[in-house]
Structures are given as structure tokens and as C-alpha cells.
Image (cartoon, grey):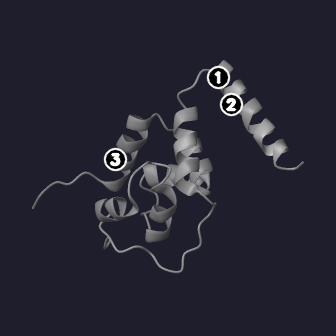
Amino acid sequence: MTNQPSFSSILRGLMDNRGLSPRAVSRASARAESTILQLLHKHIEPTPEIIKDIAPALQILEADLLTIAGFPAAPISNHPEPYRNTAEIGELVSIASSLTNAQIRQLLELARKIKNEGHI
């Protein structure tokens, strides 16, 4: 019998390696921050639906994260995307989490400008 790391410890490692906070994963995955914290503290077990939502935020393939959690690697069918472009949003949150306060303000200003251009 092998001692495999728990899902929560692997999740913590993935988040630490990417500089992601529970809040950042929550925002990028459309999952409550409390859900992410409960996963990290082993209060709940991961489900395939949660894994599908958080994988893009963690910049890991859904099939890989499913395998890590002990589920079959087959994609989940009939599960709506929480956001369009989930992977890109996850990457944006990951990048933003390593920026300085001044850079965050610049990013917000640029995002607002882009958003407003779409409403003309």
C-alpha cells in the first residue's frame, strides 16, 4: 500500500506553485471561496463537477485533475460552463495574482476601457 498525497495537499501545492489564493481560484472558477477552503482543509471531498470548474483556474487539464482526485479521466458531459472562456479567465487571474498594486490598477483600468468599448 502506498502513501499517496491527499487531494487537498495536491491542491495546495498547485495553488502555491501558481501563486493563487483561495479567492483567486474561487473567482476564476465560479465556485464559492468557502468551497475552495473546504477542499483545502479536507472538510469536503472533490466532485467531478468541482474539478471541472477549478481545473482551468489551476492551469491543469481537467482529465489530469480528475485522475489526481481518483475519478475516471473522461470529461463530464452535460455540465454547463460557469463562464465563457474559463481557461483564459483562470490564466488572467493567475497572472494578476502576481502583479503589483500599481499593475493591478493599470489592468483594471484597461479592462474597464475594453468593456466600455464594447458598449458603444
Q: Badge 1: how crowded within 10 Å, few (<14), some, or many (20+)?
A: few
In percent of width and height, residue 3 lies at 16, 54
Report which residue position mark 2 lands on: 107
**Pointer 1 with pointer 3, Cβ within 8 A:** no
Q: Residue at x 52, y 39 (%)?
A: 94
Report which residue position mark 3 lands on: 9
Dot 3 falls on a residue whose secondary structure is helix
Measured Cα–Cα span from mark 1 to mark 3: 31 Å
| Amino acid on which disc 3 is placed | Ser
In the depicted structure, whether residue 78 falls above or below residue 47: below
Report which residue position mark 1 lands on: 103
Dot 2 falls on a residue whose secondary structure is helix
| Amino acid on which disc 1 is placed | Gln
Q: Residue at x 38, y 36 (%)?
A: 17
In percent of width and height, residue 67 lies at 29, 64
**Pointer 1 with pointer 2, Cβ within 8 A:** yes
Quarter assignment of residue 99: top right
Quarter that holds the N terminus? bottom left
In the depicted structure, whether residue 61 falls above or below residue 79: above
Q: How many marks?
A: 3
Residue toward you, 34 or 112 = 112
| Amino acid on which disc 2 is placed | Leu
Q: Residue at x 80, y 36 (%)?
A: 113
In the depicted structure, whether residue 70 falls above or below residue 8: below
